[in-house]
């Protein structure tokens, strides 16, 4: 299994100072920075768009800040170039939002970003089998996308296991409700990229939580 990557979700950070929040998480030992993009269509909420990511990128260079862009948007094809231009590192679209995942994967690669595909809780892992080898990352949602601070869904772990058995070298990310209490189940199932919003940003010592998450995955 690939090494752990811990990706604090900036959705739980202070939106009035996102550049500072990015730097703070890097100083606390994060590997990636998880950026939740919501458009008010694919999910009811609206968060941030390309101009904000452009500003975050000015605060942290590509060398130190890996922006894992979780695209909770309808028509993900529309946003590939704007997010590439803004400085996105990985473009993770939702399977449920596109008619042609393979064409979209191609489009993201041509734009110079890594590419991931996310599945919502009700979507089976098998939808990914036809094109998974072309991906850098699979995201198995462990809450319904749309908001931070929800409860982890342990019944998603069989999907993670199934995907880990099929794709031993793939980055497999879990997102939603991850923290010290739930990381054991996710790590046992084979997840190695861990998104954590509330548990990291709400901690008095974020570095300690990030380290615990990483150590649990790598053990
Ligand atoms: C939910 C988002 C998550 C969320 C995770 O739609 O995709 O990234 O911010 O937050 P926590 O860790 O608080 O569940
Ligand atoms: Zn997310």
Image (cartoon, rainbow, N blue to C red):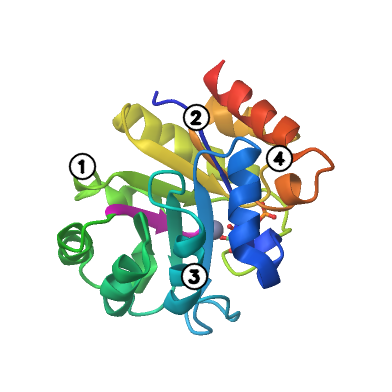
| Neighbourhood count class around disc 1 (C-alpha, 10 Å): few under 14, some 14–19, many 20 upward | few
Q: Nearer the viewer, residue 32 or 143?
A: 32
**Residue at the outermost bottom position:** 41
| Neighbourhood count class around disc 3 (C-alpha, 10 Å): few under 14, some 14–19, many 20 upward | some
Is the CB of mark 4 within 8 Å of ligand 1?
Answer: yes
Q: Where, by quadrant of the figure, is residue 148 drawn?
A: bottom right
Q: Nearer the viewer, mark 3 or mark 2?
A: 3
Q: x%, y% of residue 208?
A: 74, 31
Q: Where, by quadrant of the figure, is residue 102 drawn?
A: bottom left
Q: Earlier in the sequence, mark 3 or mark 1?
A: 3
Which element is circle 2 on?
loop
In the rendered view, tell whether residue 48 sits above or below residue 95: below
Is the Cβ of the residue at disc 3 closer than 8 Å to that at disc 1?
no
Q: x%, y% of residue 6?
A: 55, 38
Q: Nearer the viewer, mark 2 or mark 1?
A: 2
Q: Where, by quadrant of the figure, is residue 16 drawn?
A: bottom right
Question: What is the C-alpha distance between the residues marked 1 and 4?
Answer: 29 Å
Q: Which residue is mark 4?
A: 179
In the rendered view, tell whether residue 39 sits above or below residue 94: below
Q: Nearer the viewer, mark 2 or mark 4?
A: 2
Residue 8 - label? none
Q: Earlier in the sequence, mark 2 or mark 1?
A: 2
Please state the extent of the stretch shown in magenta in the rendering. Answer: 114-123
Q: Which residue is mark 2?
A: 4
Q: Which residue is mark 1?
A: 133
Q: Which residue is painted at 51% across and 64% down in the image?
A: 56
Question: What is the C-alpha distance between the residues marked 3 and 4?
Answer: 28 Å
Is the Cβ of the residue at disc 2 closer than 8 Å to that at disc 4?
no
Question: What is the C-alpha distance between the residues marked 3 and 2?
Answer: 28 Å
Question: What is the C-alpha distance between the residues marked 2 and 4?
Answer: 14 Å
Q: Earlier in the sequence, mark 3 or mark 4?
A: 3
Q: Which residue is mark 3?
A: 55
């Amino acid at each position: 299994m690939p090494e752990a990557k811990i990706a604090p979700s900036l959705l739980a950070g202070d939106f009035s100072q996102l550049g500072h929040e990015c730097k703070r998480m890097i100083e606390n030992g994060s590997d990636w920075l998880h950026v939740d993009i919501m458009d008010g269509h694919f999910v009811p909420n609206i968060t941030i768009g390309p101009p904000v990511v452009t500003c975050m990128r000015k605060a942290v260079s590509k060398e130190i800040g890996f922006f894992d862009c979780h695209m909770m948007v309808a028509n993900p094809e529309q946003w590939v170039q704007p997010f590439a231009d803004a400085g996105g590192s990985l473009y993770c679209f939702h399977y449920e939002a596109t008619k042609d995942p393979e064409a979209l994967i191609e489009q993201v690669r041509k734009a110079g970003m890594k590419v991931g595909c996310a599945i919502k809780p009700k979507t089976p892992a098998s939808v990914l089998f036809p094109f998974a080898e072309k991906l850098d990352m699979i995201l198995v949602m462990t809450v319904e996308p749309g908001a931070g601070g929800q409860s982890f869904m342990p019944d998603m772990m069989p999907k993670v296991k199934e995907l880990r058995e099929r794709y031993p070298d793939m980055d497999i990310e879990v997102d939603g409700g991850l923290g010290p209490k739930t990381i054991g189940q996710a790590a046992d199932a084979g997840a190695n990229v861990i998104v954590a919003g509330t548990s990291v940003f709400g901690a008095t010592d974020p570095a300690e939580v990030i380290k615990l998450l990483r150590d649990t995955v790598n053990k």
